[in-house]
Amino acid sequence: DRRGAVTGMESILIVGSGQAGVQIAVSLRELGYRGRISLVGSEPHAPYQRPPLSKAFLVGDAEASSLDLRNVAFYVEPGIDVHVSERVISVDHDGYRGTATTDCGRTLTFDGLALATGVRPRRLTVPGADARGVHYLRTLDDAATLRRALSDHERGPGTVAVVGGGFIGLEIAAACRARGIWATVIETAPRVMARAVSPEMSTTLERAHQETGARILLGSTVEEVVTSDGQVSAVRTEDGQLIECGVVVVGIGSLPRTELAEQLGLRCDNGIVVDEACRTSVPSIVAAGDCSVFQPAWAPRPVRLESVPNATDQGRIAAAALLGIKPAPQPPPWFWSDQGALKLQLAGWTAESDRRVVRRATGSAPLSIVHYVDERMVGVEALNSPHDFSAVKRALVTGDSFPPEAVGDVRVHLKDLLATTQR
């Protein structure tokens, strides 16, 4: 029984019921903690998977019932109390123990506190942005509302305007095209996914989406959402283009939910600042997932990652820290994005790479781009290239590196290079 690993640790409160929050609860039980665990989430649903919301669920290939992270019995058996439709609005904490008050008037006492508060969508702030027909995609309810709007749109003419050409924007555009709906992506940067992928990958993604019939406007900024009787009718860009549409979907980034952390006096800087053990500036409080900012060994500056793998890794680390157990180091990050027939997989940290080796037999997918810093392999972008992705990801975990000259030869299988480096 590791309950005594932290003196007096009889109850732990986890604020946030997404991937990170659930992982903290699961890991606490796996580590032997037998005290009370309260998992509080503001949504009216049991904890669910978010990635399918912009993919299979939006297309109609998945239903809400298939998205549960765990079935209800899973929480009952180990004694994890899940509170839905309830938001923690204030916390009193003396450095070791505290009480939390929810918007339902409930008071929860705790000896350990974990913040997994997630993010909120960044809002569009132009005239008409609050009109009917403007959508954001973060929650299951958001996705269900947007799916109904797309179903209505299938029966009429026009296009869907997607504001933002990042992960969410391109996934939504692909979902629209899968449903036979025209989509126009409006991106302020000179290329799609500019903050996440290399120019070569951006060009390939842009071309692939255009081949499905999606229209992509680069270097273009929305100036106004045009309305008729309060309903979206068009989007006007700064250069004067008018895109007639009945649905607008905004995917221009997110903002971390730090209200409780700030109330507690925790250090925040584009998120809740944590150390390698997910401890906040008050070491007895941990934070994990999309809301946290940390300085990893593999990046030259603090980062905030929004991904399932990061939420899972940090959930395990945060649980260990709560119990006074030294956690394993966090592995290099990885991400994925399904955009219709395109499966993009990223591993490592490529933002500061000084060399890119492109592996491509033709002018389109499959495509892999391996990144280096001072001849040391630091990451990979793989489009419909799961074997290349898997080989590089495994090498990054073990600290191995592939010679750039060998990587550049498309006749060489990267899994063979992996076998060579690990002999």
Image: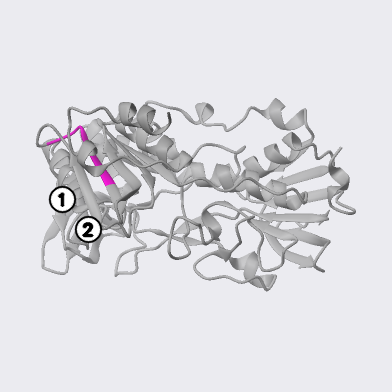
Say whether residue 5 is visible: yes
Q: Where is residue 98 in the image (x, y as percent from the top left)?
A: 82, 62
| Amino acid type, callout 1 | Ile
Q: Where is residue 71 in the image (x, y as percent from the top left)?
A: 64, 27
Please tell me how crowded label 2 is: few (under 14), some (14-19), or many (20+) other residues with Cα within 10 Å. Answer: many
Highlighted magenta segment, given as a residue range: 364-370
The C terminus, quarter of image: top left
Q: Position of residue 216 (x, y in %)?
A: 15, 50
| Amino acid type, callout 2 | Glu
Q: How far apart are marks 2 and 1 (CA)?
A: 8 Å
Q: Position of residue 109 (x, y in %)?
A: 83, 56
Disc 2, SS: strand
| Residue behind mark 1 | 216
Disc 1, SS: strand
Give residue 283's quadrant in the image: bottom right
Q: Which residue is at 66% across, 47% downward?
A: 327
**Display colour scheme:** one colour
Taking the image as shown, residue 295 lies to the left or right of residue 135, namely right
Q: Which residue is at 46% across, 60% downward?
A: 303
Based on the picture, tell me whether residue 369 belongs to the magenta stretch.
yes
Q: Which mark is residue 187?
A: 2
Q: Which residue is at 49% across, 42% downward?
A: 308
Q: Which residue is at 25% across, 30% downward?
A: 341
